Image (cartoon, rainbow, N blue to C red):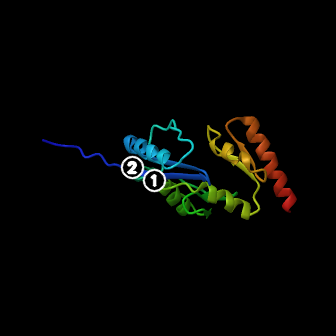
Amino acid sequence: MFSIIKKKIVSLASINSHNQIVISGDRSSVYEASLNCKRLGAKHIFKLKNKIAAHSELMKPISEKLKKILKIITINPPKIPVINNVDVKFENTSKNIKKALIRQIYNTVRWKEIIDFIKSKKIFVMLEIGPNKILTNLNKKDKNIISLSSNNLKNFLIAFKKINKGKNERK
């Protein structure tokens, strides 16, 4: 007779701000951890629509698959800064970008630290690339950052103009 032992894993998926933290893992353990957070004083608990345990240890097997895929993909050195969200630093080589992409699948996203890092580098225009506006919405409270989502052509063109304007002002 076989028995399946299910891992009870809850990981710190993302630190978005001083008062917004995301946890991830197997559903029952995340639910249990959420109840404990509420009992300990968390004001709001939201269930995200994610169907996967993003940024948790449960994603390590997927990271191995991504590693194989990235071996056959060429990533050119970026012309604009790319920030590794696991180590909160600029990556400028294909090798380091690929390593960071693999590790971010199962490690904590340090978004608050990333925003602080960006501001310390005097970067004030950000473009979120992807179908959603999650990070753009997180930045709305910070009046020092212009954050736009590229989820439509209009926003992309606005951001592109602002980025180019900023480049010309720095020259």
Work out whether residue 105 can be spotted.
Answer: no
Tag of residue 30? none
Q: Amino acid at mark 1?
A: Tyr
- Asked if the residue at tag 1 contacts the one at tag 2, i.e. Cβ–Cβ closer than 8 Å, the answer is yes
- Please rate how many residues cluster around mark 1, counting C-alpha atoms within 10 Å: few if below 14, some from 14 to 19, many from 20: many
Q: Relative to residue 144, is residue 139 drawn left or right?
A: left
Q: Quadrant of the C terminus?
A: bottom right
Helix, strand or loop at mark 2: helix
Q: Position of residue 43 (x, y in %)?
A: 57, 44
In the image, residue 31 above or below residue 121: above
Residue indicated by mark 2: 58
Coordinates of residue 69 in the picture (x, y in percent): 45, 50
Residue 76 in percent (x, y) is at: 61, 57
Could you give the CA–CA distance between mark 2 and mark 1, rounded to whole angstroms? Answer: 7 Å
Q: Position of residue 50 (x, y in %)?
A: 49, 38
Q: Quadrant of residue 6?
A: top left
Q: Nearer the viewer, residue 164 or 77?
A: 164
The residue labelled by disc 1 is 106
Q: Is residue 145 left or right of residue 88?
A: right
